[in-house]
DNA sequence: TATGTAGATTGATGGCGGTCGATCTGGAGC
DNA sequence: GCTCCAGATCGACCGCCATCAATCTACATA
């Protein structure tokens, strides 16, 4: 993969001849791109990014009742954002009594992190 | 910042007393969170992520006519995705003659990359 | 059993995003 | 000037997303 083929279109060419041959292919396959894009999508909201940031600071669990007052949005919206993050695999949660505790799943971030740092 | 305050709500408390005091704050300020979320949003589509992937392989410029045939979408849609990436600061472009050449701006990815690898 | 509470769910609303067909722009070559 | 072509832009369509008010679900405590 990543063969360095001709990337500069011919400036001179016969009429009807296509500008470029089909050439370089992405190194990241479609399926992996979809997985990483999914994680990026989960982080594509400032509030969700800050939620993950708080959870990562305390490498243990954090009670939802700690998170809600940090943001200028209602409780249902916080709950919604946490659900989005959970469905993306970025966080998980446990319930204990009345309270729900959320924590980060670091392995979910590794793929995107490594690709970005390539 | 990142003071490790009490994160476990009191299981016993007086009636009317709130579950938790407002406690931990995000390490990442709102404005920085918005910038990083903006980059994440630009990468939150598999096609855009693969576009960036191709551009990063060839650390120079790539002609749009190389990119278009790689994906099962029309030319206007490719153009749209490149515009989204450009407006997010992730890529930039130059025009030479009939052709447009795109390239990655690596510094745009650094913030998110470093935060993810924290 | 009844009451209070943390957090999830529902339904509605307004705005944004991906895609396409059609059109526009501007450089190249005759 | 005329024609051809690469790529950008426009307009429309449709589905998704962030938010809120209202409601629901468990659990706890009396």
Image (tube, coloured by chain):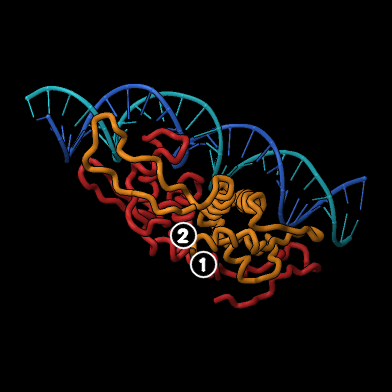
Chain colours: A red, B orange, C cyan, D blue
**Label 1 is found on which chain of the structure?**
A
Q: Relative to residue A100, is residue A36 drawn left or right?
A: right
Number of marks drawn: 2
Residue under circle 2? Answer: A36
Return the disc, 2 or 1, that comes first in the chain's sequence: 2
Instruction: Establish if D12 lies above or below A11.
Output: above
The residue depicted at 63 percent of the width and 51 percent of the height is: B88
Q: Relative to residue A114, is residue B39 drawn left or right?
A: right
The residue depicted at 66 percent of the width and 71 percent of the height is: B59
SS for callout 1: helix
The residue depicted at 76 percent of the width and 59 percent of the height is: B94
SS for callout 2: helix
Q: Relative to residue A64, is residue A72 drawn left or right?
A: right
Residue A40: percent from the left, percent from the top? 48, 54
- Residue sitting at the far front: B14
Residue A48 in view of the camera:
yes
Q: Nearer the viewer, residue A37 or A116?
A: A116
Separation of residues labelled 2 and 1 (CA atoms): 9 Å
Residue A18 in view of the camera:
no
* Quarter assignment of residue C21: top right
Q: Nearer the viewer, residue A84 or A94?
A: A94
Q: Relative to residue A4, is residue A81 drawn left or right?
A: left
For label 2, count other residues whose C-alpha is less than 10 Å away and answer few (under 14), some (14-19) or many (20+): many
Residue under circle 1? Answer: A115
Residue B112: percent from the left, percent from the top? 55, 58
């Amino acid at each position: 993969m990543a063969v360095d083929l001709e990337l500069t279109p011919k400036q001179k060419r016969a009429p009807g001849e296509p500008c470029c041959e089909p050439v370089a292919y992405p190194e990241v396959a479609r399926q992996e791109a979809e997985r990483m894009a999914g994680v990026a999508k989960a982080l594509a909201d400032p509030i969700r990014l800050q939620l993950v940031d708080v959870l990562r600071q305390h490498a243990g669990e954090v009670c939802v009742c700690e998170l809600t007052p940090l943001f200028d949005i209602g409780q249902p919206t916080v709950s919604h954002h946490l659900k989005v993050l959970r469905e993306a695999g970025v966080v998980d949660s446990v319930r204990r009594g009345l309270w729900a505790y959320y924590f980060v799943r670091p392995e979910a971030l590794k793929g995107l992190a490594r690709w970005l740092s390539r």
